[in-house]
Amino acid sequence: MPFRFIRLFLALAFLGWLLPSCDIYSLDDKEPDWLGASVYDYLKTDGHFNNFTHLVDDLNYTDVLSKTGSKTLFVANDSAFAEFYKNNSWGVNSYDQLTVSQKKLIMNFSMLNNSYLTGMLANSYNGGVSGSAGSLSEGTAFRRVTAVNALDSLPFDIGDKIPNSTNWAYYKSRGIYLLKDNTPLTSVIFTRKFLKQAFISDEDFRIITGRIRTDNDVFIFDSKVLKADITCKNGYLNLIDRVMVPPVNMAQYIFDNKNLSVFSSILERFSAPYYDPASTIYYRQFHPEFSDSIFVKRYFSSYGGQIQYPNRDIINSGFLLAFDPGWNSYANGAVESDMGGMFVPTDETMNNYFNNGAGLLLKNLFGTWDNIPLEILAPFMNRHMRTSFLESVPSKFPTMVDKENSLLNVSKDDVAKPFVASNGLVYETKKVYPPDDYISVYGPVLLSANDKVPGEKTKIWNWAITSNDFRLYLNAMEKDTKYSFFVPTDDFFQNYIDPIAIAKDVSCALKYHYNTKNNTVFATVYSYNKSTGEIGTDSIGVIKSNTGLIRNRLLDMLNSHIVVGNVESGNQYYITKGNVALKIDGGGIGMKVQAGGNIMLNEQVSVTKAYPQANGNTYFIDRPIQSPLKSVYRVLSETPEFSAFFSLVSGFPADSKSAIFANKKNYYGIDFVVKFFNTFNYTVYVPTNEAINKAINDSVISPWETQGGIIGINQMTDATKQAAAISKLEDFLRYHFQDNSVFVDNKDAYNLYQSSTMKQNDYVTHFDTFKNKYYKIGVKSSPGKILLTTETNRNVNVVTTNKLYNIMTRDFIFSDKPSAFKEADGTGGGALFESSQIYTSSTAVIHQIDGILDFH
């Protein structure tokens, strides 16, 4: 017995399911008795496959299916062909009406160029890397490459078969030989093993294919295998109940469907014809008379598509789709194991969305779908494109998310007429699924950053958002999260006082500009007079876009322009994401906004447009919100009414653990910063000078210097008593610093807040504060008033008669001391001013109170 036959026999004995193909025996003298006829002989002698054998003969496949090859065929009998002739997309009524191309498509689409038992069709093999062994994955495959050649059908498209976009205009009247794709065409095979492994239910299958299956059924697309695994000398035959015509790919199905024309017209703007030299040369070998060129339709995508235009110019990444929907061999991993999906709103749905729904903002800005730029349409299209069929079946609808982990909110009631294309699943939908970019507070910024939008532009702010990765934050759609987002428009993006420069000799204001040549932001520098508040009219410098300063300052501004909450709730004061307090007057268009810097500069920020969005409101404003430019130290030191309190808090030795103010490494600010502030918002209660002096006279605390017969701490000679006095003073003062900023506002509220003094004993206090916890302060707010209650159950009022309340401050932390940098105009020594960075900050509101706060 020949060695090859012995090897085959052993393989059969051990594996059972592995069967030979005809070529294994091509050199042997005798075939096993159990092998049946060849594929062709079986079909010919059966008598029920005259149409199919006619195909074989006409296409010169007789020898292949009689003698050679190792094939798997899914064939329809004459009864199925009779039904096919009654109704088909080609309009063919009999075999004689089939063209050669149509015959090739039917024939080759029914054929796999390997022999598979149906039980093996769900298995895939990973071939290994660098000589390592591969592995068998059972139940993971449902696609197989067919014998269809892209050139089995070469259409000549012209007129309405050509997309209407500008990329196709040249061929609209001239026509073009156009392949819809030039990669291998696959069949989709639903087996029990695969469906179980992929957790695809029978109900999913019914919705997707319109067919009902039982446990062991096998379907090729929606064609059911009636009889499986008919063994022949050179492969396997499977009898199916329908004639299979190769389905088009997803993009072509959408293009051909008149009910999806709006979505299709958008999709085709992302496509272009690309010359296909390989197909042209190959086709001419068999058709010497052909002297034209063959093109292939490709879609702009970094995954399976094109990232260059036909002229080889690079396509802007913002113009790219998630994948090429016309890619027949679409592969999300192994080609056998997944394909794509698309949710495509009907024309009625798209028009309703654009004219009456959330898309009305798009219509108001652009007028028509055709006017919307590709970079704005790309997120819309990608939201409707699914990179995984496995994750897009109906049972997965409740948990489906996009690439940014945002729920799609698709329901089974939304979808109709699913179509299994050659490369994915298309659902027609009765609902539009816009990207969060459109409906979030970021939406108006994104849309208004485009030159095609009339009115205010937001290119600078959009650059700030994308450069600092704020887009996903602003797109958050949590049920209880609502934003108020303030957006300075490009024309008013000026006179931002730089907080580092204000601590230097040459203080400056920055005016931001958008560079359309390289799509970046730069700033021009103008002098700022700290004494008069005047801003110079001539530029004294330029800060380029490639420096860290631009992104850093815009990040700081972003944090000061976002309020988590509704600023039209009826209150007057709100805290931003960056802990900067805003004073709000009015609502909607015309709303007046001020932060501490605006108040200091005696300017108001006005809202010019207001956009209600799904997760809050977006307000366009006519100047940037300027955060406070004065520190707690600065306000206390320059306000005479705070002098007694300031002399106490500033008296600690600079390097002592008790020091309240600091100006050293990790604490570099405009001047001095409160050392125990920690990137949050606070309240500082400042007793009147009289109240401080009374506390000293009553021996509640000791002054630093002797006054009125009271010995000062610096004059104490007993070190133990001195240390005790310092500790007592520190605790007393820190009890006047409270977590959370509380403003004299027009609301009624009562809350307990934590002070900065820790309880170190077991004495019972009014608020039952435990040892090693921070003493509390009770704060009762009412319109125009704040009443404080201490741990001794003593009441103290915020003084509102002399405007020494609601004073906004900000303690910045810089990357280095301001003096380490050159001046903003480039003069002086040190590092470049452009290298200066705002690391973090804390804010505080200061109120004068009519007494001291005590805790024991």
Image (cartoon, grey):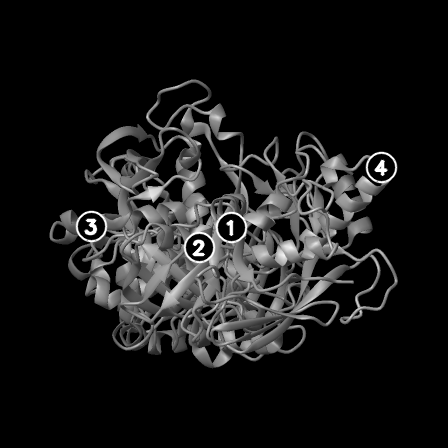
Which of the two discs, 3 and 4, sits closer to the camera? Answer: 4
Q: Distance between the residues labelled 4 and 2?
A: 103 Å
Q: Which of marks 1 and 3 is nearer the N terminus?
A: 3
- Of tags 4 and 2, which is closer to the observer? 4
Dot 1 falls on a residue whose secondary structure is loop
Mark 4: amino acid: Asp
Image-quadrant location for residue 444 = bottom left
Q: Nearer the viewer, mark 1 or mark 2?
A: 1
Left or right: 385 with respect to 355? right
What residue is rendered at 37% in x and 55% in y? 599
Q: Residues under labels 1 and 3: Cα distance?
A: 27 Å
Tag 4's secondary structure? Answer: loop
Measured along the vertical axis of the image, is residue 484 above or below residue 653? Answer: below
- The answer to whether residue 50 is left or right of residue 669 is left
What label does residue 718 carry, if any?
4
Query: Which label lies toward us, 2 or 3?
Result: 3
What's the CA distance linking mark 2 and mark 3? Answer: 31 Å
The first of marks 4 and 2 along the sequence is 2
Closer to the chain start, of discs 2 and 3, is 2
Q: Name the residue under label 2.
A: 108
Q: Could you classify mark 3 by the number of other residues whose Cα lies within 10 Å: few (under 14), some (14-19), or many (20 or more)?
A: some
Q: Is disc 2 placed on a helix, strand or loop?
A: helix
* Residue that badge 3 annotates: 168
- Residue 579 locus on image (x, y percent): 52, 55
Quarter in which the C terminus is drawn: bottom right
Q: Which residue is labeled 1 in the image? A: 331
Q: Which mark is residue 63?
A: none
Looking at marks 3 and 4 on the same chain, the residue that comes earlier in the sequence is marked by 3
Q: Are marks 4 and 2 in contact (CB under 8 Å)?
A: no
